[in-house]
């Protein structure tokens, strides 16, 4: 098995660390909030208020399941429009009360079903991109496993973006890329090499700001988040917006 295949398989593994695992491991006093105030609660998005080193923060993550029951409840980690609107509601609440926003992104992509399109999937994602770009509080995104398409970017318009060493991040799945380019989804690994979707490649291209070692993961995550929150808290609201704008403008 090639190195790229091993990384993709690790990123998608059933026992891969989840957003809930990370929230329980590095935050305290987590109080989960539910619903988008429009239609329903999407279990693919978990979010709420927590404390990090005693500081109140808003934490939002995309949750996948580890068995059939959990995957059905979370739609295999594919958020619906309600999930993205729930996430945006929590981010705007964080902005109102001056709390930093920390997101954990793990999805192959947004849910593509008819009912999602009927409820405005594209508009919900687009609105998140627009609103996140303009938030006046620090935003940090971490990709612990798989970040795919606009479904991932809808929670990753951040001042700083980090990946775990065995995570992947791309505009679409390598299977989808291979199917479009060669009409052969089995050429996944070849497509993945061309896409440069692994953490080390994306760091070399300055797409992400750092790669987090998975050995002593919680300690490493705490260290990175502590350093980044300390630095970002020194910036004014206007500087945070400009830094975020320039970060994505360069692509």
Image: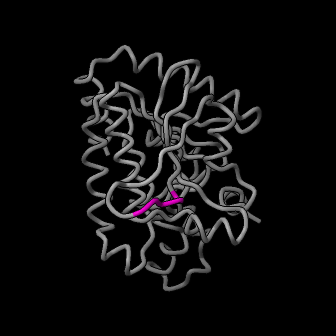
Is 218 situated above or below 129?
above
Tally of numbered tags: 0
Q: Is residue 92 left or right of residue 148?
A: left
Q: Position of residue 14 (x, y in %)?
A: 73, 62
Q: Is residue 249 left or right of residue 109?
A: left
- Which quadrant: the N terminus? bottom right
Q: Residue furthest bottom?
A: 183
Judge by depth and name the residue closer to the eye, 52 or 179.
52
Q: Position of residue 35 (x, y in %)?
A: 42, 54
Most prominent secondary structure in the magenta stretch? loop
Q: Is residue 223 magenta?
A: no
Colour convention of the picture:
one colour
Is 125 situated above or below 226?
below
Residue at the image point whose x is 38% and y is 81% from the top: 114
Residue at the image point whose x is 34% and y is 26% from the top: 97
Is 222 situated above or below 65?
above
Magenta stretch, residue numbers:
40-44
Judge by depth and name the residue closer to the eye, 188 or 39.
39
Residue at the image point whose x is 76% and y is 35% from the top: 215
Judge by depth and name the residue closer to the eye, 239 or 68.
68
Q: Position of residue 195 (x, y in %)?
A: 49, 60
Residue at the image point whose x is 33% and y is 36% from the top: 247
Q: Position of residue 17 (x, y in %)?
A: 69, 49
User: Quadrant of residue 115 in the image?
Assistant: bottom left
């Amino acid at each position: 098995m090639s190195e790229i295949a091993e990384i993709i398989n690790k990123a998608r593994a059933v026992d891969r660390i989840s957003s809930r695992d990370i929230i329980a491991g590095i935050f305290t006093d987590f109080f989960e909030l539910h619903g988008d105030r429009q239609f329903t609660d999407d279990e693919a998005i978990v979010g709420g208020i927590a404390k990090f080193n005693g500081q109140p923060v808003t934490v939002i993550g995309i949750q996948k399941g580890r068995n059939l029951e959990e995957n059905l409840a979370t739609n295999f980690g594919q958020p619906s429009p309600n999930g993205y609107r729930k996430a945006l509601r929590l981010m705007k609440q964080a902005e109102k009360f001056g709390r930093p926003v920390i997101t954990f992104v793990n999805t192959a992509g947004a849910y593509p079903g008819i009912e999602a399109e009927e409820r405005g999937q594209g508009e919900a994602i687009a609105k998140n991109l627009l609103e996140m770009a303009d938030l006046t509080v620090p935003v940090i995104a971490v990709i612990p496993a798989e970040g795919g398409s606009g479904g991932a970017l809808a929670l990753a318009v951040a001042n700083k973006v980090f990946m775990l060493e065995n995570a992947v991040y791309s505009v679409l799945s390598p299977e989808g890329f291979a199917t479009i380019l060669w009409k052969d989804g089995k050429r996944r690994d070849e497509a993945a090499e061309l896409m440069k979707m692994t953490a080390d490649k994306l760091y070399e291209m300055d797409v992400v700001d750092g790669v987090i070692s998975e050995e002593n993961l919680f300690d490493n995550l705490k260290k990175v988040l502590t350093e980044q929150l300390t630095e970002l808290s020194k910036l004014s609201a206007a500087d945070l917006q400009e830094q975020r704008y320039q970060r994505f403008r360069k692509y």
